[in-house]
Amino acid sequence: MKQIILIAILTISVSFANAQTKVYKGTSTYSSDVICNLNNDKVYKKTSSYSSDVICKVSGKKVYKGTSSYSSDVLYNISDGKVYKGTSSYSSDIVMTIKDSKIYKGTSSYSSDVIATIKSGKVYTGNSSYSSDIQFTIDGYVTIEEFVAIWHAVKYSY
């Protein structure tokens, strides 16, 4: 009996460890509307899990192009909610700032500079909270680094 329970727990644990987080267009949850998916720190095109379909990957506080681990292929470096271009840590290279569920242009924290609002897995345009302004929906919890990778995939690969 103990072995059966242990096997069940291990099976469930492995299932959660390999869980795929899907990103959908707007408010949709149809499989045909999957933009990309996150699995094992990699963002794949649509519902794919092929290594050739990796858009970018997360490693530590960095987002890399494709499956690369080379410093020359760092797309973003994330620190304290600030998203820097490449491996930079200069304030002039901040692409966006993520703070209090808002994404701001560069280093700004002004409401007029809000690019998007994140609420309950949905990403809205600007300060909006209208369902018609939902850009995409993430069907699970993600780290800030994973969110940046998804943002990149949606904005530049979709």
Image: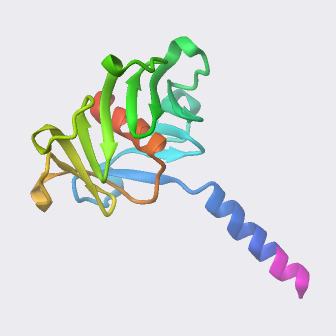
Name the spot of residue 31 as percent of width and height, x first: 36, 55
Name the spot of residue 13 as percent of width and height, x first: 70, 65
Pick the front one: 83 or 46? 83
Tell me the quarter of the picture where residue 137 sits: bottom left
In the figure, 91 relative to 41: above or below?
above
The range drawn in magenta is: 1-6
Residue 114 seen from this side: yes
The residue under the point 38% across, 31% down is 83
40 horizontally vs 122: left or right: right
Residue 158 seen from this side: no
Q: Is residue 155 magenta?
A: no
Tell me the quarter of the picture where residue 15 sits: bottom right
The residue under the point 30% across, 32% down is 96
The residue under the point 58% across, 21% down is 68
Pick the front one: 93 or 23? 93
Name the spot of residue 72 as percent of width and height, x first: 53, 11
144 horizontally vs 61: left or right: left
In the figure, 71 relative to 51: above or below?
above
55 horizontally vs 125: left or right: right
The residue under the point 60% across, 45% down is 40
